[in-house]
Image (cartoon, rainbow, N blue to C red):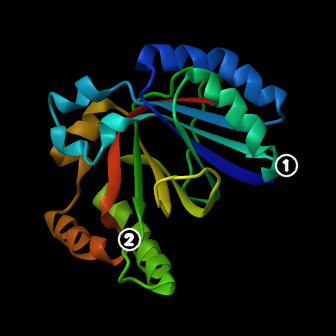
Amino acid sequence: MEKLIYLLDRAATPGTLKHTLLNDGLDGLRGSQASEITINIANMDSDVSNVAPQRIAGPWSDLGAAVSLWTATVDRHKDYLSVLAQTGCTIHGYLVTESVPQPCADRWAEGERRPGVTQFTAHGKPDAVSEADFYRNWTEHTELSFKLHPDRWSYVRNAVARPLTEKAPPYRALVLEHFRTLEDFTDEDRYFGDPAIVQQMYEELPGFCDFNTMVTGPMSEYYFR
């Protein structure tokens, strides 16, 4: 099995994009033999920017949705791209490897909005950092992140194996971190742990994160088996 992630721009409004993806889009992806489909919609900007604008960074206004799916073969990429193109959005696709350092044991009804907030982050590898150092530093940051975000619900880390579409941004990391409530995400004292750990995080970020390509912000999440 292989995992693909598609990033859609905001050619459609969040409401229209949500309706299309959760209806015809979902049916089309399933019809093309996709499974374990996760649809994230960037429709929480006002909820977050009014109280915690620092949680949104980079060209976030360009990103409308992120669609993750599993497939028996990446050869079906063109089928999935055709389905998602019905949204009218520009689409960038990636083949990724998934790691789940912090699984989520809780369950909710299939197709219902996941409680809380999903923080989506994408970034490239700094040019001055080697491949080996990039992955080592990213792994060390993952370990640190449990202390950095003590109230985080779960964490899914996707390493980009290769882009699937032309002109796709040079992302190497596509990350989804989940928080149970809006307040867990927006309240600085609940989002971050020990200030010393926060300072350590800022010192380590240049070792694996290219700030010139980084984008991050809040999303609503829907999951379909």
Between 51 and 188, the one lying in front of the other is: 51
Image-quadrant location for residue 163: bottom right
Residue appearing at x 41%, y 33% in the figure:
219
Q: Is residue 196 above or below residue 119?
A: below
Between 14 and 189, the one lying in front of the other is: 14
Q: Mark 1 or 2 closer to N-term?
A: 1
Instruction: Find disc 1 in the rendering and name its residue.
Output: 72
User: In front of the other: label 1 or label 2?
Assistant: 1
Image-quadrant location for residue 21: top right
State left or right for residue 121 relative to residue 110. Answer: left
- Amino acid type assigned to the residue bearing label 1 in the image: Ala
Is residue 150 visible to us here? no
Residue appearing at x 45%, y 27% in the figure:
115
Circle 2: element type: helix
- Amino acid type assigned to the residue bearing label 2 in the image: His
State left or right for residue 186 relative to residue 41. Answer: left
Circle 1: element type: loop
Residue appearing at x 67%, y 22% in the figure:
25
Q: Is residue 107 above or below residue 26?
A: below
Image-quadrant location for residue 13: top left
- Spatial CA distance of label 1 from label 2 is 31 Å
Instruction: Find disc 2 in the rendering and name its residue.
Output: 141
Is residue 40 visible to us here? yes
